[in-house]
Amino acid sequence: MKISYLFIISLLSFFSVNAQQYRFKDASLSSKERAEDLISRLTLEEKAALMCDQSDPIPRLGIKKFNWWSEALHGYANNDNVTVFPEPIGMAASFDDQLLYTVFNAVSDEARAKYNQWIKNGNENKRFLSLSVWTPNVNIFRDPRWGRGQETYGEDPYLTSRMGISVVRGLQGPADAKYRKLLACAKHFAVHSGPEWSRHELNLNNVDPRELYETYLPAFKALVQDADVRQVMCAYQRLDDEPCCSNTRLLQRILRDEWGYKYMVVSDCGAVTDFYTTHKVSSDATHAASKAVLAGTDVECVWEKYPFKNLPEAVEKDLIKEADINKSLLRVLTGRFDLGEMDDDAIVPWAQIPASVLNSKEHQQLALEMAQKSMTLLQNKNNILPLNKNINKVAVIGPNADNEPMLWGNYNGTPVKTITIKNGIESKITQNKMVYDKACDLVEDKVNQSYFDQISFEGKKGMKATYWNNPNREGNSVVSQQILNPIKMTTAGQHEFASGVKLEGFSAKYETEFLAKENDSLVFKTGVTGAFELLVNGKSITKYNNWRTVPGKIAFAVEAGKKYKIEILYAQSNNWQANLEFDFGKEHDLDFGALIQKLKGIDTVIFVGGLSTLLEGEEMPVSFPGFKGGDRTNIELPAVQRKCLQELKAAGKKVVFVNCSGSAIAFTPETTSCDAILQAWYPGESGGQAVADVLFGDYNPGGKLPVSFYKNSDILGDFEDYSMKGRTYRYTTNVLFPFGFGLSYSKFQIGTANLSKTKIKSNENTQLNFLIKNISKREGTEIVQVYVRKVNDKDGPLKSLKAFKRINLKAGEKQDVTIDLPSASFEFYDASTRGINITSGEYEVYYGTSSDAKDLKMTKVFVQ
């Protein structure tokens, strides 16, 4: 035994010494040189494993486990005690790409700090706690029904490009630094914007080349060429019969050959599996893996059973050469060396970022500033806003008034503190001047009468909860306790479900009995992230495993005198935050008469409604009226809220409507029933303060719509038709509130502009010069937008945003403004070359305060 022990120690010492002599360990070499050396030492099986998003460690070479999947959409997602900024669609409304850079510089600091803290505590790299972040989403929000449009920067390619560049630069750190702070990712490449329900089998044929190059590709090109983004994610659907993750036109000809992209491509999660399960372009996982790699996909993400693990088999079958695998792996490992994660922390500056930056006061203030700048005032009849803080009394009602998770949006982290809109308003007026009532739910027109106080188990009131620190309810339990109120539990904020229960890898069983007093129809209401099953008398009523909280409602008939045993089986899954909500009882019809009576004597009502990420988002099993699979089937305000607003109007109330949503809503009836409409988006942890600041005049709104708000659902085309005809401000004027629109408490006057050159060559720039004046008695900010249209281009867009500038002016102040128009401002699709070019001809240059013709002035330039 002693000889064996000494032999093992000697062997380990030998490997340790030799590990230091490997060239890939030499930090003075380039990342590419180090990656090449490492590849030369790997087995084929090891190579395949390193191309999976959850990359296995290779102990013999000192290679640590690595995960490619983390998110940083508007803060470091799926993590606690981080700063939660507004949802991207809201930040887009700021038209402030400089502030956006500062936001994502803070986000990358917090991501590094979380990672540093985790690793220094002896933990392994894991999903959602890594240095690779799959952000930003630069798809074009072409249709307001798309549930994930909230993750984007709107419907315009130029605005999306400008904002996306700032995101990437903020995340990755200075371009001249030896190490990248994080690796950002441009997603989803390409031509991807819903529907969620068909994305795994959707085939887009005959996409107009002009729309491809002018609408769907510009933001990706900008991030590749101007921001040096280090990852591109290929999308789920097919383009011209070929899945995006095996589409050589996209991944090779356009991305690498035309744009010069030299870094890695990652698959969306499960996209390669779709090759043989839904798209039916591959016979099995082995064929799918080789097909993806040969087209240029370098890393595969999937929940389990990686097709890429079959790459050695694909080599044996001569479906792919090992040299092809090496080519992809070189890009993957170069990315890891660029992060410095294989080097000593002492030489990686980003590894020194301390935990003290997490949700720091500076970051909290930054979240508030961005939320304030995102506020978009759409209507203000008779200048009802701002409200006077000395108002006699005000009612604050609506399903989103006191809703914390709504403010966080989707792909979110959990902040230390959240200021709801109700909280924000309470900070402006004395408590006795405010009356609060939820009034209604977001969608349902019923009120639930809870029967939780009528249940008991083993002689004790409530539900018995038993917990295990394993996922399968095996062995001895950790703790049992009695729950007396409707269940609402979460691990967000490092909260345990019960004392001694782990935050991950735990399971639970909840048991109770209900004795029915009469024949009745009851409803179980649930909201779950994780593995969930509801049983009644041993029979499964519903069962699912979901990675985001989805509301559920299950009807159940009971008979008088019968006893019903109710059980919930729950388990936390993967690295997902655990959430469990449960109640049951009887539903009653909603009666607004009682609400109106409660508000008697109150003239002004602030109604906070809209949507939430429980209704719109990514591939969600939601089927409420008007919603399907994460998307919307119509864009009207949910009927119960519309009815509530109409009842308030009929009662003679002055209604200020604060709408929280990640997408456009058809507000046509609300322009009549409401005196003011403030679009607040999903404004983050400080959103409630920002809303209150605007409502009571402590902040002058200046946000502009990054999407068109249409009049109704009837004017929308087929959701699965990717033609741009009739979509967005670039191809229609049939809207209620136009792209770029937003009111202020100030008024501005823009003079006639001059161009520094009215005739330019194709490689020359020009400048737009004009005078702007604040003609009101209040300091404010105007966002001047510049649009270009090529004359006699009958198939081209009506106009296209090419520049914008935020201008802050004190009351009565005027300023000479210059806006640069580089030669690229006059780039449009050229059918003769089937690409983007600057062609000779006359161009109209529009400038003003929105995309609406009545808000614009025009001049012309001729390109020779």
Image (cartoon, rainbow, N blue to C red):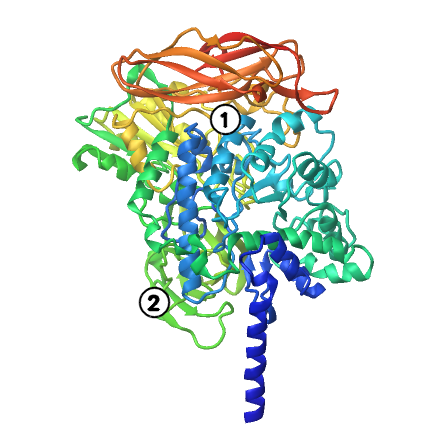
Q: Residues within 10 Å of mark 1 (few under 14, many from 20)?
A: many
Residue 229, given in percent of the width and then of the height, sits at 56, 41
Disc 1 on helix, strand or loop?
loop
As drawn, 222 above or below 484: above
Q: Is residue 276 visible?
A: yes
- The disc at residue 707 is 1
In the image, what residue type sits under mark 1?
Val
Residue 191, given in percent of the width and then of the height, sits at 64, 34
Q: Is residue 296 left or right of residue 143?
A: right
Q: Is residue 279 left or right of residue 337?
A: right
Q: Residues within 10 Å of mark 2 (few under 14, many from 20)?
A: few
Disc 2 on helix, strand or loop?
loop
Q: Nearer the viewer, mark 2 or mark 1?
A: 1
Residue 814, given in percent of the width and then of the height, sits at 32, 12
Residue 353, given in percent of the width and then of the height, sits at 38, 53
Q: Earlier in the sequence, mark 2 or mark 1?
A: 2
Alpha carbon separation for disc pair 2 and 1: 47 Å
Q: Nearer the viewer, residue 796 or 393?
A: 796
- The disc at residue 165 is none
Quadrant for residue 743, please give it: top left
Q: What residue appears at the point 48 percent right and 38 percent down from the top-left corner?
A: 167
Q: Nearer the viewer, residue 91 or 656?
A: 91
Q: Nearer the viewer, residue 523 or 552?
A: 552
Instruction: Look at the image and tell me in which quarter the C terminus lies.
Output: top right
Instruction: Look at the image and tell me in which quarter the N terminus lies.
Output: bottom right
- The disc at residue 499 is 2
In the image, what residue type sits under mark 2?
Ser
Q: Is residue 86 visible?
A: no
